[in-house]
Amino acid sequence: MKFSLGPVLYFWPKNEVLDFYRQVADWPLDIVYLGETVCAKRRLMRLGDWLEVATQLTAAGKEVVLSSLVLLEADSELKALRQIVDNGHYAVEANDMAAVQLAAGRVPYVAGPQLNIYNGETLALHHDLGASRWVLPVELPHTTLADLQDQRPVGLETEVFAFGRLPLAFSARCFTARTHNLPKDDCQFRCVDYPDGMLLKTQDQRQFLAMNGIQTLSAATSNLIGALPDMAALGVDVVRLSPQSRHMAQIVETFAAVRDGSLEPLAGQTQVATLVSGEVCNGYWHGEAGMDWHGASAQGRRL
């Protein structure tokens, strides 16, 4: 079972992004996804910059995949998508059907978690169009995964999102700009002030959601390290860890220790929970409310 590092979902300064991936080169990861998936206005990292990072990570033995935007709204974004698909070296994570259409029959692609793959027929369609791997939508339980594993075409790999705030929804409206009474077109890039998203609470002060520009995330951090043995038994090929701004190296190492058998899953579960800000969750995996925790206590601490 391989580990992947998903694309950075947040808006970090360019020097921090470059420093982050210099560290990633030494982590026990097999696959690294690169690129902006949330907002086209975040242009501190251009395609050329991502390709330079890709070269460095490839030299370090990582498989690199270039990720595409989830929500395209302008011709300029479609042009940028074409450049990503036509990069000539790396597979593409398609997070929108426009990316699938451009990649189909031309370059291998990963069917991203936003493509709503819920049945065997859709799996077969993507395989026929050239997908080499698909990512389970974050809201689906392990029982549905088991059914889909029985139906997936030969040669199509399966990837599961196992760590990070869960990407739930996207909107044409920028919630971060609206919070600061700014129009979307003059947002002043205020999302850079929230390196792990802007936390929202209910009236009774329970953590509820996190806003990241146009993206809505879970407030709690998904922690499926305890389910790694079950994923292996289900034939999952790749486990995805989504970057957070702090302690990511320790989190990756803990997941690797559980996979390799040098750390018990329950101990790894507790350890990871101490490395996140706020609460952890695994409800969706168990067919329950996504924000819930199922099983032994694993409360995150605020960092």
Image: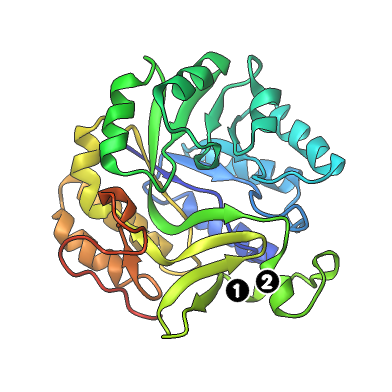
Q: Residue furthest front?
A: 203
Name which residue lies at 52% across and 76% down. Answer: 200
Above or below 243: residue 108: above
Total labels drawn: 2
Q: Nearer the viewer, residue 181 or 88?
A: 181
Q: Which percent across, then down, holds residue 296?
A: 15, 65
Kindly indicate the quadrant of the structure image that contains residue 194.
Answer: bottom right
Identify the residue at horizontal 73%, vertical 72% (top origin). 177
Q: Is residue 150 above or below residue 143?
A: above
Whole-percent x, y for residue 129 in the image: 57, 17
Residue 92 in view (yes/no):
yes
Q: Residue at x 66, y 16 (%)?
A: 106
Indicate the position of residue 34 as horizontal and vertical percent values. Answer: 59, 45
Residues 50 and 175: in front is 175
Under mark 2, the amino acid is: Thr
Q: Residue 154: percent from the left, percent from the top?
A: 37, 14
Task: Please say if the residues under marks 1 and 2 sit with CB atoms less than 8 Å apart.
Answer: yes
Name the mark on residue 176: 2
| Residue at which label 1 appears | 194
74 and 159: which is toward the camera: 74
Question: Looking at this rendering, what residue extends furthest in the bottom direction?
Answer: 204
Q: What is the crowding at mark 1: few (fewer than 14 residues within 10 Å), some, or many (at least 20)? A: some
Q: Is residue 83 left or right of residue 26?
A: right
